[in-house]
Image: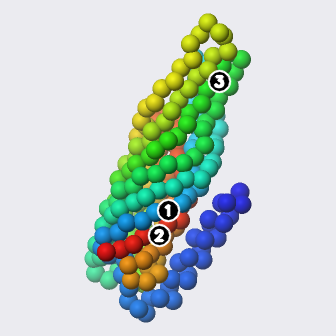
Amino acid sequence: MKSICLLIGAMVVMPSAAVAQSREEVTLAGVKIGASIDYRWHDGDFQLPRIATKVDEKEGGIGYRGHVGYDAQIGKALLVGAEAGIGRGGKALIGSSTTGDYSLKPRWTWDVSGRVGVLPASNVLLYGRAGYSWLRVRETTDFRATNLKDLKSSSTEKGFLWGAGIEAAVTQGVSARAEYVRVNYRDGLTSSKIQLGMSLGF
């Protein structure tokens, strides 16, 4: 909970500090690369018929992501862009019964998305994001009966993502962002994260 409060506090403080730079007329348009750190939750609610139980829990953990993108400014008040990213993080979802134990471990994730936003100042962007995400997962089922073989498999979940955020140019070519993103994967599996990041523009 402490991590969440720190992230939310940074979301408030970061853009307000950058607004003071608006008179320099820096912009957010162009090619950019960057990285972010996040706190992400994986939420599971699905049946496990092999061990006669279900996963019904939410687990949170630290994650990270790198991104590359391009933004174009339209007029003085509108910006549109596209972005691709890759990252990793989060904790396993667990299910247990008298028959056995199950775990789903999130691994690498990658995504593509577009964003549209408004510019209340030349260096401050309020935006919404939508796109598609892929999540690599590792599933294991350990049976308690010694005559049953344990199961291990890897697969790729995929689903639509959406979110919103704020980005502010600290100086020309350097910007900071705070963003919330949610992804709906298969039925009963979702991911949400709050991320803080920096970008370098070219």
Q: Mark 3 or mark 1, which has the lower sequence index? A: 1
Q: Position of residue 11 (x, y in %)?
A: 58, 70
Q: Is residue 1 above or below residue 138?
A: below
Tag 1, which secondary structure? strand
Mark 1 touching mark 2, by CB under 8 A?
Answer: yes
In space, the residues marked 3 and 1 are separated at their CA atoms by 34 Å
Instruction: Please tell me whether residue 6 is drawn above or below residue 140 in the rendered image.
Output: below
Q: Earlier in the sequence, mark 2 or mark 3?
A: 3
Residue 179 appears in the picture as rendered: no
* Type of amino acid under label 1: Ser
Q: Residue 44: give x, y in percent of width and height.
A: 58, 37
Locate residue 165 relative to residue 149 in the image: left or right.
Answer: left
**Residue 159 pos. (x, y %):** 41, 43
How far apart are the two marked residues, 2 and 3, measured between alpha carbons? 40 Å
Where residue 181 sits: x, y (%)? 49, 56
Quarter holding the C terminus is bottom left
For the point 42% across and 70% down, the residue is 199
Which numbered disc covers residue 166?
none
Query: SS class of the residue under badge 2?
Result: strand
Mark 1 / mark 2, whichever is N-terminal = 1
Residue beneath label 1, please? 36
- Judging by the rendered image, the residue that carries numbered circle 2 is 198
The quarter of the picture where residue 134 lies is top left
Which residue is rendered at x = 51% and y = 89% of the image? 20
Q: Nearer the viewer, residue 171 or 82?
A: 171
- SS class, disc 3: strand
Quadrant, the N terminus = bottom right
Query: Which residue is label 3 attached to?
Result: 101
